[in-house]
Amino acid sequence: MWQELTPECLAKVQEVFGIFDVDGSHAIDKNEAIVHWKNAFGRISAREFFNTVDADNDGQVTLEEFIEFWKVVKSSGHSEEEILEELENIKNGESWVGFNDLPKKYQKQGSSGAQGQ
């Protein structure tokens, strides 16, 4: 259904997921996301992240949801170079910016979708 990620990109997705998942539960909860984004926009980044990536709206982002999200981003026309750059930005605590050209399922109500570069 969605384009597969290269092994390099998949490894980066898993690395970034692991940075969030500090308790090793194999899921990112909202508190872990807020703690990761320590800056002034941390709560906003966490909310936007969950609005976009938490596909089943259960308050947690699983590794499967996180991987699927990045497959959707790739399938929507973004290069793996863009994905790797965004993952590095997220890893470094930069604000979640989202993508405004994804299928509706990934454009949750309340999501600003500021990127689309």
Image (spheres, rainbow, N blue to C red):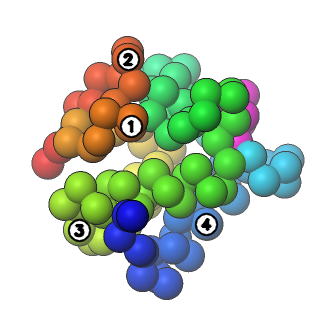
Left or right of 51? Residue 31 is right
Cβ–Cβ under 8 Å for marks 2 and 4: no
Residue toward you, 48 or 76: 76
Which residue sits at x=38%, y=17%?
109
Q: CA distance from mark 1 to mark 3?
A: 18 Å
In what element is the residue under mark 2? loop
Kind of residue at badge 2: Gln
Residue 111 lies, in percent from the top left, at 36, 23
In what element is the residue under mark 4? helix
Circle 2 is placed at which residue position?
109
- In the image, is residue 106 above or below residue 79? above
10 Å neighbourhood of mark 4: few (<14), some, or many (≥20)?
Answer: some
- Front label number (2 vs 4): 2
Q: CA distance from mark 2 to mark 3?
A: 25 Å
10 Å neighbourhood of mark 1: few (<14), some, or many (≥20)?
Answer: many
- In the image, is residue 87 above or below residue 11? above
Q: Quadrant of the N terminus?
A: bottom left
Residue 40 lies, in percent from the top left, at 48, 21
